[in-house]
Image (cartoon, rainbow, N blue to C red):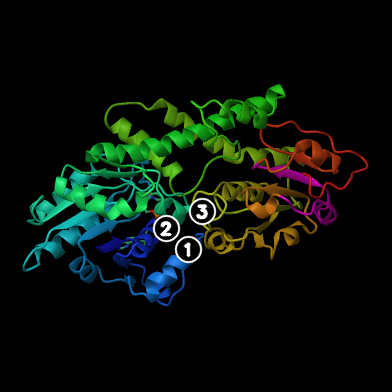
């Protein structure tokens, strides 16, 4: 099939590359000329495991190409995906100006065609209920007839950054929201190669498809937040949230996933989608109370470690050097949008600390946001040299089994604030570390530490 993807960011690039891998002819469009130039020259613009292989193959075999020319892409494609930003507007509701603006451009282009061919316009962006109808109205205003010249489909994307390629190639479900049988058939054909193991393609009405995406993200954000609240109570009553996670996760009604307590959720989706769903509910006269609480609790949770570090050092961090491990909002990505690490870093700086940070992939993306108010270390150990404490913000694999003896020697004092519960608190105390984690007991470090390398 001939496919155009409008918006070549995290979702657009993964979507385009994976469709090309399945044999489709894909053209990816973006207004960012530098991004398109880089992609054309064979260089990826995001870090995403597994993407490079498909990207290189797509380019080599000419099934994947990149352009800034929307008109040319629209002219040559049957299915046009919109993978455009839907950032929060001032009141927290989704800003649809990108989606509706491009829909207008496409409407103009299709209306100007001599012999008009049928197209499917697919919303892959996360968009509020009613957006498919608004996109359809935009195209109709350009003189096009729904069902004859075009159909609009809501096809929300559920990929997770860090495992995006795997998720796209083997989705647990594909949601196709449309009232058009013709569009549903074409979309089903397009996705069939991705669900050969039997996962379902669910065809539903547009509004339900749009709502499914928000409900999924809002539920997941709520699940994490619930566990963060449980962890905060554990801290106070002397229980261990790790034990509770396993204890409740074995209940099949609850499930094992998404029960890890930490320093709050971030990323480009959860914070904005939770807000947007709360605003949609409000616009329809309903107060979605849980979501307002999720947002409040998450804001508090992201500041938790700062308060702990400040308390530990007696209320002032002036003259303190704090090492931060992990900048990406989660492992295996370079994405730092709404990253808890940035909230932590800003908080530490506000209290007078000097911050030296390390991340395996997200230093450049962080530099683009925070600039040089922090210094960036060459590797994880270099960040520790002469630091008064270490704060862990992202659970990268390489932080899970470090050389603890080396860490103890490099740190000015062996103090760790772990926002991701990577190590065993008892072993850390045996290794001489003053180790604080989330929702788990703290043990006083022993006076004569033993080596815990390979254990903690
Ligand atoms: N990132 C995720 O994990 C994820 C997962 C599922 C859904 N989504 C949703 O997908 C959508 C896109 O998210 P993303 O993370 O890929 O965003 P992104 O910011 O990484 O990418 C958006 C791209 O669109 C481009 N763009 C902006 N205006 C344009 C225009 N007029 N014409 C062409 N290109 C234009 C930007 O330059 C950018 O490259 C959002 O609605 C998001 O909520 C994201």
First in residue order: circle 2 vs circle 3: 2
Q: Is residue 257 left or right of residue 187?
A: right
Task: Find residue 449 and report its image quarter.
Answer: top right
Q: Position of residue 268 (x, y in %)?
A: 45, 49
* Horizontal side, residue 333 vs residue 90: left or right: right
Percent across and percent down for residue 368 are 52, 63
Q: Position of residue 75 (x, y in %)?
A: 18, 68
Q: Residue furthest right?
A: 448
Q: Quadrant of the N terminus?
A: bottom left
Label 1 residue SS: loop
Is residue 160 shown left or right of residue 185? right
**What residue is shown with label 2?**
10
The residue pinned by badge 1 equals 46
Which circle marks residue 100 in the picture?
A: none
Please, what secondary structure does the residue beneath circle 2 have? helix
| Residue 97 visible in image | yes
Q: Measured along the vertical axis of the image, is residue 292 above or below residue 385?
A: above
* Residue 135 visible, this orientation: no
The image shows residue 189, relative to residue 450, as above or below, that is: below
User: Where does label 3 land, which residue?
Assistant: 162
**Front residue of 437 and 178:** 178
Q: Position of residue 112 (x, y in %)?
A: 9, 66
Cβ(mark 1) to ligand 1 < 8 Å? yes
Labels 1 and 2: the sequence-earlier one: 2
């Amino acid at each position: 099939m001939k496919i155009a993807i409008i918006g070549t960011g995290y979702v657009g690039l993964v979507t385009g590359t994976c469709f090309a891998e399945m044999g489709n002819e894909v053209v990816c469009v973006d207004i960012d000329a530098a991004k398109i130039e880089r992609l054309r020259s064979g260089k990826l613009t995001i870090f995403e495991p597994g993407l490079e292989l498909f990207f290189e193959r797509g380019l080599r075999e000419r099934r994947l190409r990149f352009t800034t020319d929307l008109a040319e892409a629209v002219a040559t494609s049957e299915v046009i995906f919109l993978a455009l930003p839907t950032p929060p507007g001032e009141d927290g509701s989704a800003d649809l100006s990108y989606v509706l603006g491009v829909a207008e451009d496409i409407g103009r282009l299709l209306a100007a065609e001599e012999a008009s061919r049928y197209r499917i316009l697919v919303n892959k962006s996360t968009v509020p209920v009613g957006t498919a109808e608004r996109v359809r109205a935009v195209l109709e205003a350009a003189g096009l007839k729904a069902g004859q010249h075009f159909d609009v489909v809501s096809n929300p994307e559920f990929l997770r950054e860090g495992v995006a390629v795997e998720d796209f190639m083997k989705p647990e479900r594909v949601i196709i929201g449309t009232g058009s049988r013709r569009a549903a058939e074409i979309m089903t054909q397009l996705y069939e190669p991705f669900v050969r193991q039997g996962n379902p393609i669910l065809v539903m009405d547009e509004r339900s498809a749009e709502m499914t995406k928000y409900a999924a993200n809002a539920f997941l954000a709520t699940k994490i937040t619930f566990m963060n609240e449980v962890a905060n109570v554990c801290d106070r009553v002397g229980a261990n949230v790790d034990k509770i996670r396993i204890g409740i996760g074995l209940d099949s009604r609850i499930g094992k996933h998404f029960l890890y307590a930490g320093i709050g959720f971030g990323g480009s989706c959860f914070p904005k989608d939770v807000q947007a769903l709360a605003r949609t509910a409000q616009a329809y006269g309903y107060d979605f109370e849980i979501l307002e609480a999720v947002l409040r609790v998450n804001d508090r949770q992201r500041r938790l470690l700062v308060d702990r570090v400040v308390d530990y050092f007696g209320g002032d961090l002036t003259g303190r050097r704090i090492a931060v491990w992990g900048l990406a909002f989660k492992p295996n990505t370079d994405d730092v949008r709404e990253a808890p690490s940035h909230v932590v870093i800003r908080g530490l700086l506000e209290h007078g600390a000097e911050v030296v940070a390390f991340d395996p992939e997200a230093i450049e993306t962080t530099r683009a946001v925070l600039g040089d108010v922090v210094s960036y270390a060459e590797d994880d150990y270099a960040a520790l040299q002469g630091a008064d404490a270490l704060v862990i913000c992202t659970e990268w694999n390489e932080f899970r089994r470090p050389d603890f003896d080396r860490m103890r020697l490099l740190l000015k004092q062996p103090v760790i604030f772990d926002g991701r519960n990577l190590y065993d608190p008892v072993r850390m105390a045996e290794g001489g570390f003053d180790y604080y984690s989330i929702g788990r007991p703290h043990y006083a470090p022993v006076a004569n530490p033993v080596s815990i390398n390979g254990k903690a």
